[in-house]
Image (cartoon, grey):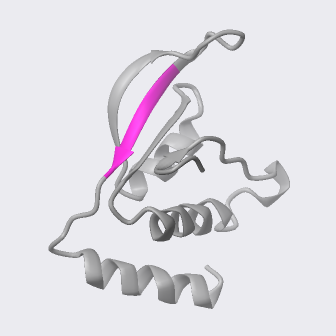
């Protein structure tokens, strides 16, 4: 991470669908509780579903810089102050349980 920006997040393909992405997002939210930003390729549907499941909103569709020059999407997450404490306690409990 670079401040509130998730610069790169990868899960080994052999570990997909085992909760690692969720754990990493929860950890990132704990490091930057006021909000997060990230970019991902438009074609990475599993990653986009994961981010959206965790409250990220697509704010811009564009193209990544060279050498990739691939269609990408910028996501932002901002906490909902009304449910912030309950959500954070739930997330910490989930981390402690390993899932």
Q: Is residue 75 magenta?
A: yes
Residue at x 49% of width, y 84% of height: 92
Residue at x 59% of width, y 33% of height: 44
- Name the residue nearer the viewer: 41 or 64: 64
Residue extending furthest right? Answer: 14
Residue at x 55% of width, y 36% of height: 45
Tell me where residue 54 appears, x and y as whole percent: 41, 59
Q: Is residue 13 magenta?
A: no
- Up the image or down, 10 lies above or below 39; here it is below
What is the quadrant of residue 34 in the picture? bottom left
Tell me where residue 48 appears, x and y as whole percent: 49, 41
- Name the residue nearer the viewer: 45 or 86: 86
Looking at the image, how many numbered discs can be counted on the residues? 0
Tell me where residue 66 appears, x and y as whole percent: 66, 9
- Name the residue nearer the viewer: 64 or 45: 64
Magenta: main secondary structure: strand
Q: In the displayed structure, does residue 51 sit left or right of residue 85?
A: right
Magenta residues span: 72-77
Q: Which quadrant: the C terminus?
A: bottom right
């Amino acid at each position: 991470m670079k401040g509130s920006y998730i610069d790169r997040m990868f899960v080994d393909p052999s570990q997909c669908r085992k909760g690692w992405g969720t754990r990493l997002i929860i950890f990132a939210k704990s490091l930057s509780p006021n909000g997060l930003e990230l970019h991902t390729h438009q074609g990475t549907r599993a990653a986009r579903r994961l981010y959206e499941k965790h409250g990220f909103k697509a704010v811009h569709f564009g193209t990544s810089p060279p050498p990739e020059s691939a269609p990408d999407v910028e996501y932002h997450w901002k906490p909902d102050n009304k449910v912030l404490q309950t959500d954070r306690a739930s997330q910490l409990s989930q981390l402690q349980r390993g899932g």
